Image: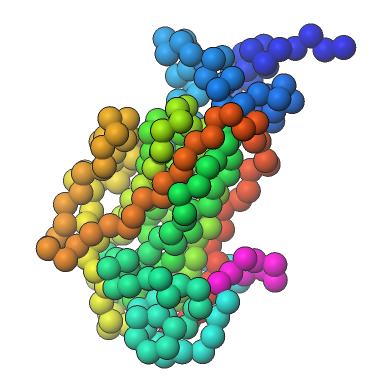
């Protein structure tokens, strides 16, 4: 009979140089919940606490668009006139997205994007939450849209930075599974932040979207510093709009349920799916 405890399992995973997320399946066997994890890691001065707070870090994950598999949970489509991401002019091209308005779609250097909303709902410690981003490259050359997921330190254990390769004139949907490990019962927020390299290219699609209000600092600095500090203080990230009509997507808000048992479903690979070609 094994004499391993939850604490010894954490120590072993830490000493093997693995991420905190890798310890979750083993911890699940002890039938722990979020409050139990808080008790195990309640000393902020320990190396294990710092290890948990670090998560997966900011190493970028690059995604190229692929055709959706037959079982992909995509919004149902119908025929419609061309328009901003398929719905702001003429008939809606992608059903189920009618809740979007012109204020929900943003543009930066010829790339348009929107974050599909998620309802405020309870989440257990270790649960996977999907962040879904629709993106459209309006220029004549391939573009990369960088998506950073910012949150209070320690909440996001999975990768927090993605680079989406966008073909000209193609609507794509990024599905980004995010592992959340909230440490308190207060509502937490995941703030997607975006960046696009500025390139010289002809514009293929002329309809415009709302200007994106970029973070004050460059994306890498915001993900690693300013936004995280603001989130810890319970504040919104600081943004600058290019003009009065600029803005940013709403954050995804989650309500931690730390009494529920810990969840440690196998990590799911992020994906970038091609939905439609508007050219």
Position of the C terminus by quadrant: bottom left
Judge from the rendering whether residue 41 lies leftward or rightward of residue 192; answer left or right: right
Q: What residue is drawn where x is 70% and y is 71%?
A: 70
User: Taking 229 as reference, is 60 above or below it?
Assistant: below
Q: Residue furthest left?
A: 244
Dominant SS of magenta comes to loop
How far from the left and from the top, in percent, is residue 95? 51, 78
The image shows a total of numbered marks equal to: 0
Judge from the rendering whether residue 245 lies leftward or rightward of residue 227; answer left or right: left
How far from the left and from the top, in percent, is residue 224? 33, 35
How far from the left and from the top, in percent, is residue 255? 47, 40
Position of the N terminus by quadrant: top right
Is residue 41 at least partly visible in the picture? yes
Judge from the rendering whether residue 34 lies leftward or rightward of residue 265; answer left or right: left
Q: Residue furthest right?
A: 1
Q: Quadrant of residue 143?
A: bottom left
User: Taking 131 as reference, is 14 above or below it?
Assistant: above
Relative depth, front residue between 26 and 166:
26
Is residue 221 at least partly visible in the picture? no
Colour pattern of the rendering: rainbow
Chain part drawn in magenta: 68-75
How far from the left and from the top, in percent, is residue 232? 32, 30
Q: What residue is drawn where x is 50% and y is 36%?
A: 256
User: Taking 261 as reference, is 103 above or below it?
Assistant: below
User: Taking 5 as reference, is 261 above or below it?
Assistant: below
Q: What residue is drawn where x is 23% and y is 53%?
A: 214
Q: What residue is drawn where x is 36% and y is 65%?
A: 113
**Can residue 251 be found in the magenta stretch?**
no
């Amino acid at each position: 009979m094994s004499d391993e405890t939850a604490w010894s399992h954490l120590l072993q995973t830490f000493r093997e140089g693995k991420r905190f997320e890798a310890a979750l399946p083993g911890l699940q066997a002890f039938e722990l919940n979020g409050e139990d994890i808080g008790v195990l890691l309640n000393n902020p001065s320990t190396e294990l606490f710092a290890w948990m707070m670090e998560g997966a870090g900011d190493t970028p994950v690059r995604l190229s668009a692929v055709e959706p598999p037959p079982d992909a949970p995509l919004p149902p489509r119908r025929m419609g006139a061309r328009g901003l991401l398929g719905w702001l002019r003429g008939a809606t091209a992608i059903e189920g997205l009618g809740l979007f308005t012109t204020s929900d779609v943003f543009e930066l250097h010829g790339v348009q994007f929107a974050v599909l909303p998620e309802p405020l709902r309870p989440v257990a410690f270790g649960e996977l939450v999907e962040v879904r981003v629709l993106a459209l490259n309006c220029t004549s050359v391939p573009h990369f849209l960088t998506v950073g997921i910012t949150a209070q330190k320690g909440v996001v254990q999975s990768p927090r930075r993605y680079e989406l390769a966008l073909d000209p004139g193609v609507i794509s949907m990024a599905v980004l599974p995010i592992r959340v490990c909230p440490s308190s019962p207060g509502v937490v927020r995941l703030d997607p932040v975006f960046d696009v390299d500025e390139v010289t290219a002809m514009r293929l699609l002329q309809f415009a979207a709302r200007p994106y209000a970029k973070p004050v600092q460059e994306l890498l600095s915001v993900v690693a510093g300013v936004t995280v500090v603001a989130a810890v203080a319970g504040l919104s990230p600081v943004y600058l709009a290019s003009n009065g009509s600029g803005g940013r997507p709403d954050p995804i808000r989650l309500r931690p349920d730390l009494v529920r048992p810990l969840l440690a479903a196998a990590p799911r690979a992020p994906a970038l799916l091609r939905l439609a070609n508007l050219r």
